[in-house]
Amino acid sequence: MSSLDLANKFKAYLEAGDEPGARSCFKPDAGIWHNYDGRTQTVDQNMATFKNILEKTKSRHYDIKRLVEIPGGFLQQHVLRVETHDGTKLAADAIAVVLVEDGKIARIEEFLDPTPLASLR
């Protein structure tokens, strides 16, 4: 599986709200770093965040602006669009540098402004 195939598979799991599927895309010791706090989450912490988003939204869509293979993984620029249960629509721009090892996500470095998604916390 190419890095771009993995990117598309991961996106599909996230949009479908499939936590086990999304988790299966990660290496067990993967790290997920965010620019806004400088911390690296474990897969378990990241999936807990994802479950929280699932509880508070009825739909999620990644509007991909750019997806390119880079040495060791891929770079994805996207707008995360969510709709809450009361119909509120939120959107946040992001860029993710994703490192892939053995067909699994080993590290994500995500750059975004979380302010538009604050109500989901």
Image (cartoon, helix red, strand yellow):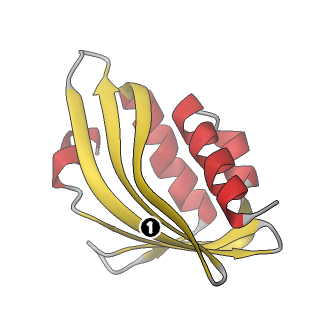
Residue 80 versus residue 40 in the image, above or below:
above
Label 1: which residue? 96
The foreground one among 70 and 104 is: 70
- Name the residue located 16 percent from the left edge and 54 percent from the top edge: 115
User: What is the tally of numbered marks visible in this picture?
Assistant: 1
Q: Residue at x 63, y 39 (%)?
A: 13
Give the position of the N terminus as an image quadrant.
Answer: bottom right
Q: Within 10 Å of the Cα at label 1, are there few (<14), some (14-19), or many (20+) other Cα atoms?
A: many
Q: Residue type at mark 1? A: Ala
Between 107 and 28, the one nearer to me in the picture:
107
Residue 98 percent location from the top left of the image: 56, 71
Where's residue 10, x and y in %?
63, 49
Q: Compared to 103, does 101 lie above or below? A: below
Q: Tag 1, which secondary structure?
A: strand
On the question of residue 27 being in view, the answer is: no
Outermost residue to the top: 86
Q: Residue furthest bottom?
A: 71
Query: To which quarter of the image does residue 29 belong?
Result: bottom right
Judged left or right of residue 84, residue 47 is: right
Residue beneath the point at 76% across and 63% down: 2
Where residue 37 sits in the image (x, y, percent)?
Answer: 29, 75
| Location of residue 93 with respect to 12 vertically, above or below | below
Residue found at the very far left of the displayed protein? 115
Residue 18 visible in the picture: yes
Left or right of 24? Residue 73 is: left
Tell me which residue sits at (80%, 67%) in the image.
103
Image quadrant holding the C terminus, namely top left
Left or right placement of residue 96 versus residue 37 in this view: right
